[in-house]
Amino acid sequence: SYAEAAPVSVKARTTLGAVTTLKATAYTSKSITLSWNAVNNAQKYQLLYYTGGAWKLIKALDAGVTSYKVTGLKAATKYTFAVRPAVQESKWIYGGYKTVTQASGLAKPATFKVSATNASQAKLTWSKVSFAQAYEVFQYIGGKWVSKGTTKNTTATLSGLPSGTTTYFKVRAVNGKKKGAFSKVKSATAKYVPAPAPAPAPTPTKVVEKDA
């Protein structure tokens, strides 16, 4: 059966080639998308992953399918996949397989809050992300997102906000070169502080003239 099969090639009467290219074309914290080359005479493709010292079937796909999105994965975890073609004679026969190892991405912060603390500062707080080594904070400035740097904490205070205006922020987890998904965009409106009124001009002192 498909579930019992492991990626071992068996010679078939039908000429059946091999999967020679298998790539991870996209990934998130919960999914990895795979694509591979079409194989002549294949009737099915078996997609498997390696776990607990054995290959396990994910899905048997029709011959016209050469990509698949594997879902339900754990964040920041390495997975090894294999794809091989299959043709049915007296029993299912399998062609050569190809493997690829890819890690799923970092999750995005589940919560993200922003509040203005005074006329020029905003305090940002977010939830911890598993496997994150740091967090990168972004601020929307001049029509584009600008990185304001990284921190190992789950809070940051940004200064220099324009008084009385609304500023937008987002944050993501970082692990080495890996970048997690962005949090939801949140905003804060710095409190408007009017410029102080100029000091009144001093009242001229009345001069009292005395008779000579």
Image (cartoon, helix red, strand yellow):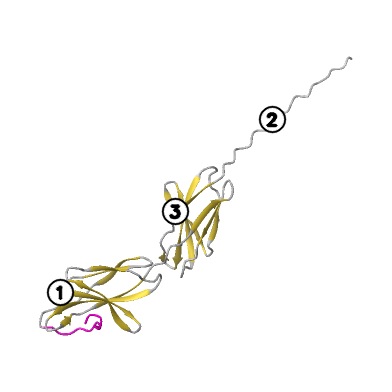
Quadrant hosting residue 3? bottom left
- Picture coordinates of residue 24 (x, y %)? 30, 69
- Estimate the spatial distance between the alpha carbons at disc 2 and disc 3, rounded to whole Å: 45 Å
Judge by depth and name the residue closer to the eye, 45 or 211: 45
Q: In the image, is 69 to the left or to the right of 174?
A: left
In the picture shown, does residue 149 fall above or below 64? Answer: above
Extreme-right residue of the structure: 212
Residue depicted at x 83% and y 19%: 208
Which comes before the other along the chain, label 1 or label 3? 1
> Number of labelled discs?
3
Q: Quadrant of the C terminus?
A: top right
In the picture, the disc for residue 200 is: 2
Image marks 2 and 3: residues in contact by CB distance under 8 Å: no
Provide the residue designation for mark 1. 43
Q: What are the residue bounds of the magenta stretch?
A: 1-12
Extreme-top residue of the structure: 211
Quadrant hosting residue 58? bottom left
Provide the residue designation for mark 3. 185
- Picture coordinates of residue 82 (x, y %)? 27, 77
Judge by depth and name the residue closer to the eye, 160 or 14: 14
Extreme-left residue of the structure: 13
- Picture coordinates of residue 159 (x, y %)? 56, 51
Count residues near mark 2 (Cα–Cα under 10 Å), then give few for <14, some for 14-19, many for 20+.
few
Q: In the image, is 89 to the left or to the right of 9?
A: left
* Mark 3 secondary-structure assignment: loop
Quadrant hosting residue 173? bottom left
